[in-house]
């Protein structure tokens, strides 16, 4: 009888290794899935950073385009810049004329907005806006 009790106790302990192995596999699979998600997020964030920089420079180009038009004609430019590089650039300009003593000064307020990636709320949407005063 003592021999049967030892034998059944040995068989009861034999399943513990399988439970440990399954637990270890589940933990390693969860860790791998986390690392994959983390890596994808890092790559997406890096791509968005590059797009943000490109949008900034497109908006800056819009301000420079408006400044060139203002300097050459002393008036707000009509139309929009022709360059895009994948971005939609919208330039708005307003002017106010002030009298200082005997001379008139015109101040131009230029706003340039560059956007790409569809509509607001889209994960790939990027927009930058630059404002400038030009006298």
Image (tube, rainbow, N blue to C red):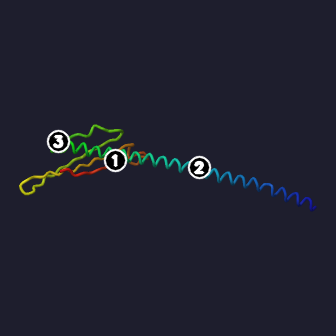
Residue at the bottom extreme, as displayed: 2
- Mark 2 or mark 1, which has the lower sequence index? 2
Name which residue lies at 56% across and 48% down.
Answer: 36
The residue that mark 3 highlights is: 72
Residue 100 coordinates in the image, percent (x, y): 10, 57
Q: For marks 3 and 2, give the CA distance.
A: 59 Å
Please state if 10 lies on the left or on the right of 53 as rendered: right
- Counting residues from the start of the chain, the first of labels 1 and 3 encountered is 1
- Left or right: residue 6 compared with residue 92: right
Residue designated by label 1: 56
Separation of residues labelled 1 and 3 (CA atoms): 25 Å
Mark 3 vs 2: CB contact within 8 A: no
Q: Position of residue 13 (x, y in %)?
A: 81, 58
Q: Nearer the viewer, residue 8 or 102?
A: 102
Which residue in the protein does label 2 denote?
33
The crowd level at tag 1 (other Cα within 10 Å; few <14, some 14-19, many 20+) is many
Image coordinates of residue 12 in percent, x first then y, are: 82, 57
Q: Residue furthest top?
A: 82
Quick one: SS at disc 3?
A: helix
> Looking at the picture, does residue 5 appear above or below residue 133?
below
Do residues under tags 1 and 3 come within 8 Å of each other at their CB atoms?
no
Circle 2/circle 1 CB separation < 8 Å: no
Dot 2: element: helix
Which residue, as the protein is rendered here, is positioned at the far left? Answer: 102
**Could you say whether the residue bearing mark 1 is in a helix, strand or loop?**
helix
Image point (91%, 59%), residue name: 4
């Amino acid at each position: 009888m003592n021999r049967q009790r030892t034998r059944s106790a040995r068989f009861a302990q034999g399943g513990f290794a399988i439970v440990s192995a399954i637990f270890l596999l589940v933990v390693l699979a969860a860790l791998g899935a986390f690392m994959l998600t983390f890596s994808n997020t890092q790559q997406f964030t890096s791509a968005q950073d590059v797009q943000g920089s490109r949008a900034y420079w497109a908006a800056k180009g819009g301000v420079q385009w408006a400044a060139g038009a203002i300097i050459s004609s002393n008036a707000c430019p009509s139309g929009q810049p022709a360059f895009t590089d994948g971005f939609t650039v919208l330039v708005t300009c307003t002017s106010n004329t002030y009298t200082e003593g005997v001379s008139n000064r015109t101040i131009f307020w230029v706003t340039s907005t560059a956007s790409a990636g569809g509509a607001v709320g889209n994960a790939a949407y990027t927009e930058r806006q630059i404002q400038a005063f030009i006298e």
